[in-house]
């Protein structure tokens, strides 16, 4: 039997491979988590849409209220993406036949819905409700950012559970008076904490219930 | 659902050997039997006994290993004092090894497949292989496309995306209409609720109505017109029909066959057809509808009337094989009024409680709530009615012997009837012959009940002797007198009595068409098959049991190229272009004085036409009503036919929800069986699952038997609707066809049945032993009225267990709302409506027979049946059990990942996205209410089949590997919470109605806020009968029960009295319940203190 042996440095090699493996996998895991949680959540990346609708023009320059299109935002879970008919209330008169609006007219004439790409896509086991937030004094801008200045639409906040919980744990830091909810120019006052506590009481926001699983998961 | 599952796991059936195979492997191949070190941690497989080879021989494929249950041994055990007070199955009393296995192991049998097929070496190979392959999943994953948002082009005015709409419409069962509210999510009907204003619903529903949404989306529905089995079109059909009609030499050569119909529009259009083609004959046949009550009324009163019983006013009820809570078009109404008089909260109310004597051949939902139950063969009900009449002084010969019905019961019953003249009800089962009904009407008449508790009104259906009608049609076809036959719905080729050979006759009709939602036994014998629309897809109208007219409106456009009966009739009338809306409106326009528009709107809004019920009519007993000789004494064994409690006459055969829901009492799923009494089982040496040959004259059928405690000794009961040859993927291969024993002379019961035992066994799956709570724990508590009166504050039968405080679990602060439930055992009949309602509301998947056999059924709400005392005539209890939402829940501390946690409103929350499937929680749960997704039961691909459209969008569809359980309908709580917050108010009592609560026709379930001292649930829980199950474990369950209090006749107290050895024999007769226990179940004035122990 021929001699079969490992050189003395094989021990060191084995030792270092073990430690190297541990380090490698730890780094890999960290990298994956970082990637999934921060780099890959598409914050600030505009999403291409079938029609070049500009919020900056409609909500910004023209100053149309959010609720003109997003009709159910105060009463239902969904804010409602408007039907083509809503576009046509104005565009049957204004800029008729222009190239930018070709998709709208095509939808209207062929009775085919416009297929928008979803920008704020929560996991299916999360049941977000717009009306609860609007009536609880959470401003549109808090999640959606400065919509009146955005030409395209992108995610303004990561919308991860940790991010949601920042507010669900301490709503007084963020709530504003209901009449300011749709105001994108609203700046939180100096005494936000004091005001916030008052509003939390006034709006019957149950701070115990808020951070609990069953608030959003069913 | 089954189909989907099979596609996903095409080899699962073969690769996962049944426990039978597993066990045999163990005996035959010792090598495999040696538990490897890796697998030794699986505790279960060792407890499954090896099957005796004798059992497994035969053509059927038993998967359940079992040890024979000796009935005499069971009887002996029950007789001596060591027997337990309550038992759920014979196996439990006999303590068979497989019962022990069910008790011992939390998840019986799942270790078997692995044990049987994989040894350690293979296991390691597979382990290594899967680890290596796991990397592959990282290789290619297409970038996720954006989810689409597809708004309307023109938004319908009333739809707000995300908020459901409810439409009042009508569903029918066997022709009779029930008002319902259909929940629609942006055009998708997902759930059925009862219409509280409709006289046939009063807010309740039955399991069939709940399951109808599944039928709507069934991918197995007939999709297209077929001509001789080949694809054709509606145009082909209408042109051929028109030609055929023009060639008609005389009208009588065209025949129409329908099920029972109450639709005024349909009837009117048939009349119009008869005017166009004079002589057209309209035949009707429904296999499980009986007009015996109606014919009995004709005998007794010489009037065409049907009875209606007002149980609200009845102090004494005598039922002669009547299942008025489980069967018949008025069952929901009866459920409500009957339970109004059965409900009991305080000792002062005991006078309100009616007394019920039930004589029946086979246990049925009605009997569960009775005070005195006597098994008696169905053929002897006539004799019993005669004896009662005789004792009441009528000139009728007595017909029953004291062997059959104990004299003391009869005496007490007659005393009661005398004492409560004018406020009693004697009711005969629909399946009893007309003569029995006539006799019973006469009794009610003599007792002065008519006009008080028993009313008569004109029937909602037309007066047709259906059996005669079908016979006439068959004879005419055989005589060559029929050129064309249009069949609307039903499946007569399958369901006709055997002596009326309709199936063969049908094949000889030159032109025949069958309109139905499925391609079935009738469709394959007709020249044309026409796909029928579902009731939720078209307009229509129907009458309720009392004649109340209701309009059915569509919730969704037809899925298939189907047409409704009204449209096919319109084709025959040459009005092809008319829609169902036109047809229904045309009919009513001609009949409405004043504004049609307001009539129409009101009818649609309310769901029915107000004040359209048939008026009550006065009746006069005919002098010769109860003449006639008594029936001859029945001979031999008796065979009783019943519609199936879950699939009815076979029409719900392809409905997975109804197939899988355990049938009352037997808890069988996916099959029917011949029910036999324990004594009969002893006589023929039979065990449950033995296959026997039933012989009735020339007719023979091989069926498996099921030993049913409480069955009348000489009665064998079979349920109709199974054994279909042509059905969908779900119903294929289920059960046996009991119609093959049914002839027109013996539609409901037959004498001289012979039984021969074969050596084969069938694979029947019953959930009776699943999720068993440890015995001897006072799960069911019950007493009698007199016991209650003795201790009105703390009845001893409610608090048999001493309570010791412990601080094993952390205290939890409850603030704000505190949700709680109460289930009243006095009125629950175990009808299964709540189980299906829960399934529809909470996206609960079905798992198939093989998986149910492994104890993996997913129902969040189960109904446990408990028997007590005597094997031959036990007391029977039905107990709905779902998650109790313990204030100190044992499941919570054991979860390593915090997937099951408590919330401030007392909900025990299940967080699916955290769950990793350790199943520790289920192990810790003393109530056995948690369900685990062993396989991917739910369809995750929303585009795969139309079934995804039924899903409730507010409830997560669970994936494989997560635990789930009752949530108290947390989605409904969340909706109410958000709504009330938006409106700056508290949730008001009654705003949240759970799915089970809404469905219950008996209103057995209360749900509400414990912190609201005015709420109904708080008031109900103040009752001294309120008890929590296993509260001695300090779980503080939020769901509690009201103990059942029987109201026996004072002279019969000994028959039923509460001689629980655990209570009285053990020396502590009565416990003053500890303050702390009260605290958990009694609401406090200050919400902060609720449950603050």
Image: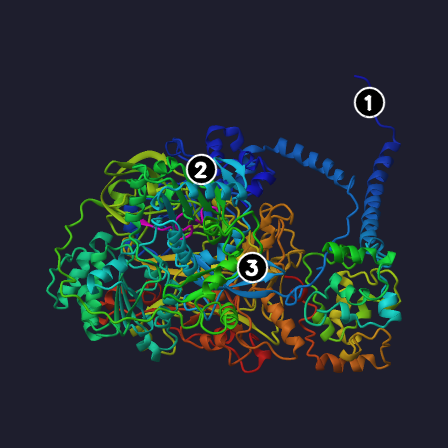
Circle 3 sits in a helix, a strand or a loop, which is it? loop
The correct choice, above or below, for B296 with respect to B610 in the image is above
Specify whether residue B648 is painted magenta. yes
Q: Which chain does the numbered disc 2 sit on?
A: B
In front: B342, or B539?
A: B539
Residue B1029 in view: no
Against B760, residue B1066 (above or below) is below
Q: Are marks 3 and 2 in contact (CB under 8 Å)?
A: no
Whether residue B465 sits left or right of residue B1002 in the image: it is left
Instruction: Please provide the residue range marked out in magenta.
Output: B641-654
Tag 1 and tag 2, C-beta contact below 8 Å: no
Front label number (1 vs 3): 3
Alpha-carbon span between mark 1 and mark 3: 81 Å
What residue appears at the point 34 percent right and 53 percent down from the top-left corner? B289
Residue A167 rendering spot, x and y as whole percentages: 77, 70
- Kindly identify which chain the residue marked by label 1 belongs to: A
Q: Is residue B240 left or right of residue B306?
A: right
Q: Main secondary structure of the magenta part?
A: loop
Reading the image, the residue beneath label 2 is B527
Percent x, y for residue B1027?
Answer: 44, 70
Please name the residue that numbered disc 1 is placed on: A4
Same-chain check, marks 1 and 2 = no
Q: CA distance from mark 3 to mark 2?
A: 32 Å
Q: CA distance from mark 1 to mark 2?
A: 84 Å
Neighbours of disc 1 within 10 Å: few (<14), some (14-19), many (20+): few
Q: Quadrant of the C terminus of chain B?
A: bottom right
Please name the residue that numbered disc 3 is placed on. Answer: B555
* Residue found 86% across the figure and 39% down from its top: A16
Q: Is residue B720 magenta?
A: no
Q: Nearer the viewer, mark 3 or mark 2?
A: 2
């Amino acid at each position: 039997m021929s001699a079969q042996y490992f050189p003395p440095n094989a021990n060191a090699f084995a030792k270092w491979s073990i430690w190297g493996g541990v380090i490698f996998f730890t780094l890999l895991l960290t990298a994956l988590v970082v990637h999934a949680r921060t780099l890959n959540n598409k914050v600030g990346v505009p999403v291409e849409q079938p029609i070049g609708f500009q919020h900056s023009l409609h909500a910004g320059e023209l100053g149309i209220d959010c609720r003109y299109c997003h009709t159910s935002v105060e009463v239902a879970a969904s804010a409602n993406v408007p039907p083509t008919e809503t576009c046509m209330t104005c565009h049957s008169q204004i800029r008729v036949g222009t190239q930018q609006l070709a998709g709208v007219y095509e939808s209207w004439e062929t009775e085919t819905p416009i297929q928008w790409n979803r920008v704020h896509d929560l996991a299916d086991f999360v049941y977000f409700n717009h009306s609860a937030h609007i009536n609880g004094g959470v401003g549109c801008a808090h999640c959606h950012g400065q919509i009146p200045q955005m030409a395209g639409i992108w995610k303004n906040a990561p919308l991860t559970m940790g991010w949601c919980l920042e507010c669900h744990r301490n709503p007084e830091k963020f709530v504003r008076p209901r009449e300011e909810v749709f105001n994108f120019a609203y700046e939180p006052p100096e005494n936000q904490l004091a005001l916030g506590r008052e509003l939390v009481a006034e709006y019957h926001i149950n701070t115990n219930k808020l951070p609990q699983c069953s608030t959003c998961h069913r | 659902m089954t189909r989907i599952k099979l596609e996903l796991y095409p080899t699962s059936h073969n690769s996962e050997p049944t426990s039978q195979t597993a066990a045999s492997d163990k005996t035959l191949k010792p090598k495999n039997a040696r538990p490897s070190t890796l697998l030794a941690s699986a505790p279960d497989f060792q407890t499954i006994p090896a099957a005796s080879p004798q059992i497994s021989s035969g053509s059927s494929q038993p998967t359940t290993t079992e040890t024979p249950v000796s009935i005499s041994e069971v009887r002996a055990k029950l007789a001596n004092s060591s027997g337990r007070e309550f038992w759920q199955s014979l196996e439990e009393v006999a303590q068979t090894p497989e019962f022990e296995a069910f008790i011992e192991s939390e998840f019986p049998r799942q270790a078997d497949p692995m044990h049987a097929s994989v040894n350690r070496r293979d296991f390691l190979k597979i382990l290594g292989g899967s680890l290596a392959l796991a990397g592959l999943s990282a290789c290619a994953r297409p970038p996720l496309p954006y989810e689409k948002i597809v708004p309307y082009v023109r938004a319908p005015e009333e739809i707000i995306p995300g908020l459901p709409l409810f439409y009042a419409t009508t569903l029918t069962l066997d022709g009779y209409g029930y008002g319902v509210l259909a929940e629609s999510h942006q055009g998708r009907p997902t759930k059925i609720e009862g219409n509280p204003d409709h006289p046939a619903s009063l807010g309740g529903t039955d399991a069939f109505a709940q399951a109808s949404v599944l039928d709507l989306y069934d991918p197995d529905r007939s999709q297209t017109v077929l001509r001789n089995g080949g694809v054709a079109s509606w145009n082909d059909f209408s042109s051929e029909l028109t030609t055929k009609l023009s060639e008609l030499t005389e009208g009588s050569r065209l025949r129409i066959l329908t099920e029972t119909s109450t639709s005024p529009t349909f009837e009117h259009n048939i009349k119009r057809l008869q005017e166009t083609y004079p002589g057209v004959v309209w035949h009707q046949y429904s296999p499980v509808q009986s007009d015996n009550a109606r014919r009995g009324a004709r005998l007794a009163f010489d009037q065409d009337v049907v009875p209606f019983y007002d149980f609200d006013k009845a102090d004494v009820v005598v039922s002669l094989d009547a299942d008025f809570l489980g069967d018949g078009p008025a069952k929901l109404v009866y459920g409500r009024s009957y339970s109004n008089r059965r409900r009991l909260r305080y000792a002062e109310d005991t006078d309100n409680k009616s007394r019920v004597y039930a004589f029946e051949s086979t246990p049925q939902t009605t009997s569960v709530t009775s005070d005195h139950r006597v098994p008696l063969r169905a053929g002897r009900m006539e004799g019993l009615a005669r004896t009662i009449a005789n004792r009441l002084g009528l000139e009728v010969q007595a017909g029953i012997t004291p062997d059959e019905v104990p004299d003391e019961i009869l005496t007490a019953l007659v005393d009661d009837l005398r004492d409560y003249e004018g406020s009693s009800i004697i009711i005969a089962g629909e399946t009893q012959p007309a003569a029995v009904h006539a006799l019973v009407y006469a009794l009610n008449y003599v007792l002065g009940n008519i006009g008080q508790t028993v009313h008569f009104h004109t029937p909602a259906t037309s007066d047709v002797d259906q059996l005669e009608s079908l016979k006439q049609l068959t004879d005419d076809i055989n005589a060559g007198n029929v050129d064309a036959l249009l069949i609307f719905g039903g499946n007569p080729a399958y369901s006709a009595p055997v002596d009326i050979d309709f199936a063969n006759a049908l094949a000889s009709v030159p032109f025949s068409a069958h309109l139905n939602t499925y391609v079935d036994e009738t469709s394959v014998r007709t020249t044309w098959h026409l796909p029928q629309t579902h009731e939720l897809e078209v307009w229509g109208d129907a009458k309720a049991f009392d004649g109340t007219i209701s309009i059915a409106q569509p919730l969704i456009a037809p899925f298939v190229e189907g047409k409704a009966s009204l449209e096919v009739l319109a084709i025959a009338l040459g009005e092809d272009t008319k829609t169902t809306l036109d047809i229904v409106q045309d009919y009513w326009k001609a009949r409405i004085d004043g504004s049609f528009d307001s009539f129409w709107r009101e009818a649609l809004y309310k769901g029915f036409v107000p004040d359209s019920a048939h008026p009550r009519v006065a009746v006069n007993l005919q002098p010769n009503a109860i003449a006639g000789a008594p029936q001859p004494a029945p001979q031999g064994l008796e065979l009783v036919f019943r519609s199936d409690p879950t699939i009815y006459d076979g029409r719900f055969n392809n409905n997975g929800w109804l197939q899988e829901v355990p049938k009352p009492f037997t808890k069988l799923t996916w099959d029917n069986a011949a029910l036999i009494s324990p004594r009969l089982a002893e006589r023929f040496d039979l065990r449950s699952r033995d296959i026997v040959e039933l012989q009735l004259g020339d007719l023979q059928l091989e069926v498996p038997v099921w030993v049913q405690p409480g069955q009348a000794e000489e009665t064998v009961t079979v349920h109709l609707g199974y054994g279909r040859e042509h059905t969908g993927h779900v119903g294929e291969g289920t059960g046996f066809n009991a119609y093959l024993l049914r002839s027109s002379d013996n539609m409901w019961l037959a004498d001289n049945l012979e039984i021969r035992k074969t050596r084969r066994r069938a694979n029947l799956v019953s959930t009776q032993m699943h999720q068993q709570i440890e015995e001897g724990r006072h799960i069911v508590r019950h007493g009698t009225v007199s016991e209650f009166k003795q201790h009105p504050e703390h009845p001893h039968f409610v608090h048999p267990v001493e309570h010791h405080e412990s601080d094993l679990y952390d205290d939890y602060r409850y603030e704000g709302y505190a949700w709680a439930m109460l289930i009243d055992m006095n009125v629950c009949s175990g009808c299964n409506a709540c189980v299906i309602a829960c399934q529809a509301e909470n996206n609960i998947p079905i798992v198939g027979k093989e998986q149910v056999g492994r104890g993996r059924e997913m129902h969040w709400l189960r109904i446990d049946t408990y028997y007590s005392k005597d094997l031959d005539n036990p007391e029977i209890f039905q107990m709905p059990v779902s998650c109790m939402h313990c204030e100190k829940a044992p499941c919570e501390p054991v979860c390593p990942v915090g997937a099951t946690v408590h919330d401030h409103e007392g909900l025990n929350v299940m967080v699916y996205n955290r769950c990793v499937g350790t199943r520790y929680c289920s192990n810790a749960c003393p109530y056995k209410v948690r369900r685990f997704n062993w396989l991917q039961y739910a369809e995750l691909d929303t585009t795969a089949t139309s079934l995804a459209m039924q899903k409730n969008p507010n409830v997560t569809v669970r994936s494989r590997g997560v635990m789930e359980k009752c949530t108290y309908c947390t989605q409904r709580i969340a909706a109410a919470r958000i709504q009330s917050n938006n409106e700056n108010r508290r949730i008001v009592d009654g705003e949240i109605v759970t799915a089970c609560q809404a469905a219950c026709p008996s209103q057995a379930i209360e749900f509400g806020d414990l912190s609201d001292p005015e709420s109904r649930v708080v008031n109900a829980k103040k009752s001294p009968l309120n008890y929590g199950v296993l509260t001695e474990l300090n779980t503080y369950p939020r769901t509690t029960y009201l103990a059942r209090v029987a109201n026996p006749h004072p002279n019969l107290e000994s028959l039923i009295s509460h001689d629980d050895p655990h209570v009285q024999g053990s020396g502590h007769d009565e416990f003053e319940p500890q303050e702390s226990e009260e605290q958990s179940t009694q609401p406090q004035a200050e919400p902060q203190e609720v449950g603050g122990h």
